[in-house]
Amino acid sequence: MPATTSPADLYRHSLRLLLDKDIPAWVGLWVDDGVMEFPFAPTGWPARLEGREAIADYMRHYPDHIDLHDFPDLRIHETTDAGTIVVEMRGVGRTVETGGAFDMTYIAVVTVQDGRFTSYRDYWNPLAVQARGVDFTGTSAR
């Protein structure tokens, strides 16, 4: 994506890549020293990932565990900082291991600079990872 892409357009593009299960391209949207944070991460799950490689390692097996079908209810809010957006959405699909429904609610604070993600604070619902087949990070303390 060009550096002139708005944060909202970059975010929408990133969702398309996740639906296409193109994790390498999704990771390519990040700056080298990007930071991804999970303030509500349960015990045993990472709360902070520093650098594109750590983010790539975290996301590498995502499609093997969660088959995303859609991101309904997407709302992107601009802020007073042109490079920061607040996103509200749901991710729906199925868990690969069980075939069960996957329905996760997200709020994210995302910062973009020069057409790349620099930070992503993901306020996802940790209760949803208690279902079998959702631990795509391999770090769960279960």
Image (cartoon, rainbow, N blue to C red):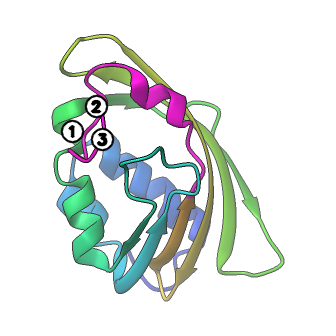
Q: Residue at x 49, y 49 (%)?
A: 41
Q: Residues within 10 Å of mark 2 (few under 14, many from 20)?
A: many
Quarter holding residue 122: bottom right
Q: Earlier in the sequence, mark 3 or mark 1?
A: 1
| Range of magenta residues | 122-142
Task: Inspect the image, locate mark 2, and give the three-letter code of the amino acid beneath it.
Answer: Ile
Residue 79 x %, y %? 79, 71
The answer to whether 95 is drawn above or below residue 99 in the figure is below
- Which SS class for mark 2? strand
Spot occupied by residue 9 in the image (x, y as percentages of width and height): 54, 63
- Furthest residue to the right? 80
Q: Which mark is residue 66?
A: 2
Overall secondary structure of the magenta section: loop
Left or right: where does residue 51 sit relative to residue 62?
Answer: right
For the residue marked with disc 1, what is the amino acid? Pro
Q: Which mark is residue 54?
A: none
- The residue that appears at 21% across and 38% down in the rendered structure is 63
Q: Earlier in the sequence, mark 3 or mark 2?
A: 2
Question: How many other residues sit within 10 Å of disc 1, few (<14), some (14-19) or many (≥20)?
Answer: some
Q: Is residue 7 left or right of residue 94?
A: right
In this rendering, the label closer to the viewer, 3 or 2: 3
Q: Secondary structure at mark 1?
A: helix
Q: Which residue is mark 1?
A: 63
For marks 3 and 1, give the CA distance.
17 Å
Residue 107 painted magenta: no
Q: Quadrant of the N terminus?
A: bottom left
- Residue 123 colored in magenta in the image: yes
Check if mark 2's residue and mark 1's residue have beta carbons within 8 Å. Answer: yes
Residue 13 position in % (x across, y down): 43, 57
Return the mark for residue 140: 3
